Image (cartoon, rainbow, N blue to C red):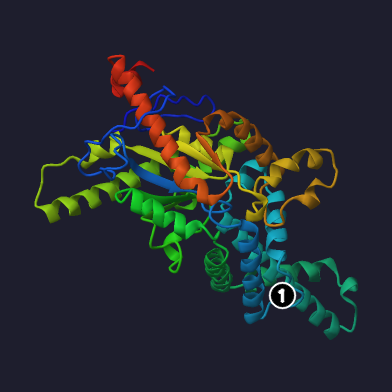
Amino acid sequence: MFRLSTVVVSTLALSCHAFVTPTSSSRVVVETTSRLWASTPEQGNKRPLVLLTFDLDDTLYPIASVINEANDAFVKAMKQYGFGADIQPTDIDDTTKQVRSELPPEEAAALSHTEARELAIRRRMEKVLLNRKLQETAEDWVTSVEDLSPVVVENAKQWTARAVSPSIVKAVMTAWEMERHHAAERNLYPEVQQVLREIKQEYPHVILGAVTDGKANPLLMTFTLAPYFDFCMSWEDDQKGRQQFFKELASSSSSAQLSWIYNAALEKGQEMATVQAAMKAAAAKNDNHDSTEEFAKGVWIHVGDDLAYDVGGSAACGAKTILCELANEYQQTARQRFDQLEQVNNNDDGDRKMPTWSTSPTPELEVRRKMNEAAKPLVDETINFIRELPDAISRILARVQDEEGTLAASGKSSSTTAKEQ
């Protein structure tokens, strides 16, 4: 059981197991005494970096470029299965938005990205088949499609709903997902691999994980990210937790909890650390170790571009946070959605300026904007370039060590401080 962090997030925290997080802000680095998680002698951290998690989209690669290329694969797959008539790359995004807009806000928000896109693919297939069926019927009856009776049209709709094969819908979705991963590798920010190599060299025992609200998985990016990552946690892996979160998001402004996914990431990190420690101990023929205690004493840092989901959610569970507010050259587009909300609400051109890939309903974005504001004080470091990440990590670890020193000087342990909160 991890001790509760002293960071209290009024709008986000809810029964999160966390690392001990002291409260002082001064800086000092001292030598480490950790056995299994020891940093290099030059670093000398008593509380080493044991877990480093990343968001993926717009953090390690530009989501707009990736989605655009995946949408091209959608068109190719639709044509391959005979649904290529007048299909455009943006159709999958536009139809996904339409699907969400027709649902009650709570249901629309709870619909996963995969579920929404599969419904969109099915709808596009049904539309192609319906147009084809109506045209054939009109030609048989020597009339125009517009002159067909409502009964005939309704029967045609029922036929097309039955005619679309679920396996073909899945096949098109799989083609889209595969290309999404390939596109992510092609569009990976140039410094990412070098920075990950540096981090692995400096913190050889750190567990690297990904936390994402979509289906991207770095372990499937064989030529780029897979060698560096130990695990991936997707929101879609826990539909119960995800649906509860979006139910709260849709119904009660800014009180939705993200503890479920970050606690899962924390537990997965502990599991990976235990395996790593056991292998290390076995190699050294040393059974006298407690990887759980070592892991709990360490520092967890989460890196991402979203204030609410990345900063607020992870900080509520004890993580230190690094916000990727990257320079224009990185082509981040996710945060543009919040910049355009005011124009959307004023019936201006905000909808047209929204990123084409975004399918989030406006009410959901409104709540998330409030969550963004609540999360701003929880940012530990902000970087504008990926190459700044190692230095940002070092600064966080230095502050943590300084906090430990301050507590020690006052005669308190970090665990005592946590209990007093």
Front one among 73 and 125: 73
- Answer yes or no: is residue 277 visible: yes
The quarter of the picture where the N terminus appears is top left
In this view, the residue farthest toward the front is 42
The residue at 64%/74% (across/down) is 163
Is 312 on the left-hand or right-hand side of 134? left
Q: Amino acid at mark 1?
A: Leu
126 lies above or below 53: below
Q: Residues within 10 Å of mark 1 (few under 14, many from 20)?
A: many
Image-quadrant location for residue 356: bottom right
Indicate left or right for 314 with 147 as reference.
Answer: left
Q: Position of residue 370 (x, y in %)?
A: 64, 32
Q: Is residue 217 visible?
A: no
Image position, residue 212 (x, y; %) = 50, 50
- List x then y, in percent, for residue 311: 52, 37
Residue 336 or residue 171, whichever sits in front: 336
Residue where numbered disc 1 is placed? 129
Looking at the image, residue 5 lies above or below residue 410: below
Reply above or below: 284 against 74.
above
State the residue at coordinates (45%, 69%).
Answer: 223
Q: Can you give x and y, in whole percent of width and height, for residue 131 in the image?
A: 78, 74
- The reply, left or right, for residue 90 in relation to residue 226 is right
Task: Please state which of residues 260 and 43 is positioned toward the viewer in this rendering.
Answer: 43
